[in-house]
Amino acid sequence: MSKAKQKGTAAETAVVNYLRQALGDTEHTIHRETLHGTRDIGDISGLKIHGEFVVIEVKNHKQYALKEWLAEARVEAGNADAPYYVVAFKPVRVTNPADYFVLTDLRTLARIAGHGIIEEES
């Protein structure tokens, strides 16, 4: 396995383990996804908000590509038929996954805060 793949796998595993512990997921419904080729559905699934699945894309890079990462998460949420998507990314020199950053857009934040109400895309 390449060093980049190892870094990504480590970050994904850290996010899964943190979310399982923080949310009391004793059933291990929150899990790493396998690759789905051109129909990828994100790195982590099993987390729900208002009964709807959240696609989580995890990144562990020194250089941030926020716009591209969010676009990737949006496409993968579409593939998964999920209304919510976020990018969890590891800041440089941060070791505790509780301190990873989470990125989404205002549309998704409004859906979360609005208890699942989804407005028409513009």
Image (spheres, rainbow, N blue to C red):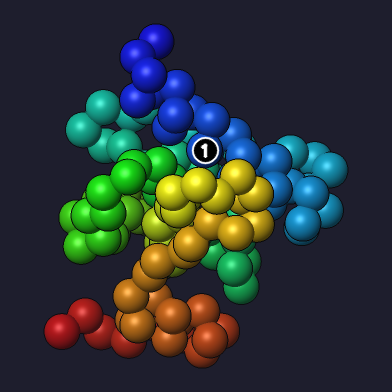
Would you place residue 51 above or below residue 114 in this image?
Answer: above
Q: Which is nearer the eye, 89 or 91? A: 91
Instruction: Decide: few, some or many residues near mark 1? Use Cα within 10 Å; few <14, some 14-19, many ≥20.
Output: many
Would you place residue 61 above or below residue 32 in this image?
Answer: below
Q: Is residue 53 left or right of residue 83?
A: right
The amino acid at mark 1 is: Ala
Q: Which residue is mark 1?
A: 11
Residue 92 is at least partly visible in this image: yes
Q: Position of residue 48 (x, y in %)?
A: 60, 60
Q: Which is nearer the eye, 97 or 78? A: 97
Residue 29 sits in quarter: top right
Which residue is at 77% across, 56% downward? 22
Q: Is residue 24 left or right of residue 55?
A: right
Q: Position of residue 7 (x, y in %)?
A: 44, 29
Q: Position of residue 79 (x, y in %)?
A: 30, 48
Q: Quadrant of the C terminus?
A: bottom left
Q: Quadrant of the N terminus?
A: top left
Which residue is at 52% across, 38% downward? 11
Q: Is residue 117 left or right of residue 37?
A: right
Which residue is at 38% across, 19% downward? 3
